[in-house]
Image (cartoon, grey):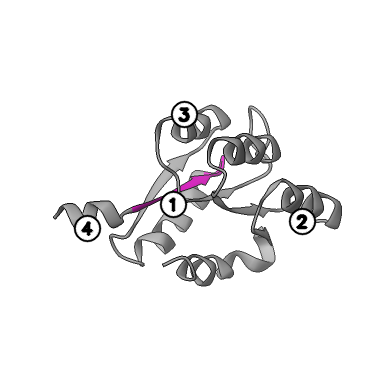
Amino acid sequence: MNSVANKTKNILIVDDSPLILERISQMIRRFGKEWNPLLAGTFSDALDFLQTSKINAAIFDIHLQENNGIELLRRAIRLHPNLFAIILTNQANNEVKSICIGIGAKHFLDKSLEFHRIPQIISTLN
């Protein structure tokens, strides 16, 4: 049983929409018990997870009520330098994409056009 627990990977999902959080969580759970979704609806909740948990991957929205996902990405990469970060946003323009990739995001997805890519991207991490 410990070998299964040791193989569990935490994926932090940050979005201020409960519907988006639930939808991504369901996508991740389809991969089985290897991935453990940690859900955060606020910047501060996400920061708490980043400071107290081992995070293997993360999906961040850019627009959060208290702060923004770009700042969260900066802090996440500082705390977890090998983090596999995905930005999922409705603000998908080249300038914002360039900033996020420069900070360390591995993927930058347009929420309205590329949401369906999340399972394929996560499956490459298994």
Residue assigned mark 1: 22
Of residues 14 and 33, the one drawn nearer to the viewer in this rendering: 33
Q: Quadrant of the N terminus?
A: bottom left
Q: Nearer the viewer, mark 2 or mark 1?
A: 2
Q: Residues within 10 Å of mark 4 (few under 14, many from 20)?
A: few
- In the rendered structure, which disc, 2 or 1, sits on the residue that comes first in sequence? 1
Q: Position of residue 84 (x, y in %)?
A: 55, 54
Disc 3 to disc 2: CB gap under 8 Å: no
Residue assigned mark 2: 92
Q: Position of residue 113 (x, y in %)?
A: 68, 67
Cα distance in 3D space between marks 3 and 4:
25 Å
Cα distance in 3D space between marks 3 and 2:
27 Å
Q: Residues within 10 Å of mark 3 (few under 14, many from 20)?
A: few
Q: Nearer the viewer, mark 4 or mark 1?
A: 4
The disc at residue 121 is none
- In the rendered structure, which disc, 1 or 3, sits on the residue that comes first in sequence? 1
Of residues 123 and 22, the one drawn nearer to the viewer in this rendering: 123
Q: Residues within 10 Å of mark 2 (few under 14, many from 20)?
A: some
Over which residues does the magenta segment extend? Answer: 9-17
In terms of image quadrants, where is residue 116?
bottom right
Cα distance in 3D space between marks 2 and 4:
37 Å
Which residue does the image show at 67% across and 30% down from the upper left?
67
Query: Dot 4: what SS?
Result: helix
Which residue does the image show at 86% across and 51% down from the upper left?
95
Q: Nearer the viewer, mark 2 or mark 4?
A: 4
Residue assigned mark 3: 48
Disc 4 to disc 1: CB gap under 8 Å: no
- In the rendered structure, which disc, 2 or 4, sits on the residue that comes first in sequence? 4
